[in-house]
Amino acid sequence: MKMIKEWQSIFTIAELCSICNISCATYYRWKKQEKTVTNHEEKTVIEICQHHKYRRVTACLLAQFNIVMNHKKVLRIMRKYNVLSRVRKKKKALSQACLVQETAMIMPS
């Protein structure tokens, strides 16, 4: 891999792959696998965001790790690695006052 990267400017990738006795598909598959989580910031975000939403992760990065990162970037990283927390809808509780007003309107006096 390193040799192909060094000589890529001079030779084509197909020529370099044939010299190394590998197929071009194998080279590109290896190249794609290298794009795992290598960035320190992304690793930190993934560690923090298991139980928090992106806004809290952004605040935590600044407070604990002194990393300034835009909330949009945090959200993009969380989407990329599929670690977004689920947001549940809050149930509205009907108060007794609402029920009393409805019954008062139905029953004429």
Image: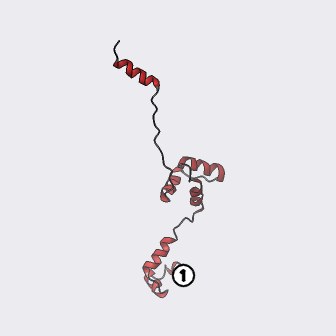
Total marks placed: 1
Horizontal and vertical percent position of residue 81: 50, 59
Q: Please indicate whether residue 109 sits to the left or right of residue 60 in the image.
A: left
What residue sits 51% from the left and 50% below the top? 85
What residue sits 52% from the left and 71% below the top? 34
Horizontal and vertical percent position of residue 36: 53, 67
Q: Is residue 17 above or below residue 97?
A: below
Q: Is residue 67 above or below residue 22?
A: above
Q: Is residue 81 above or below residue 62?
A: below
Q: Is residue 108 above or below residue 74?
A: above
Helix, strand or loop at label 1? It is helix
Depth order, front residue of 92/3: 92
What residue sits 45% from the left and 80% below the top? 13
Depth order, front residue of 107/57: 107
Determine which residue is flagged by label 1.
Answer: 3
Q: How is the image coloured?
A: secondary structure
Depth order, front residue of 6/41: 41
Tell me the amino acid under the disc marked 1: Met
Mark 1 surroundings within 10 Å by alpha-carbon count, few (fewer than 14), some (14 through 19), many (20 or more): few
Horizontal and vertical percent position of residue 69: 57, 53
The C terminus - image quarter? top left
Horizontal and vertical percent position of residue 57: 57, 50
View extreme (top): residue: 109
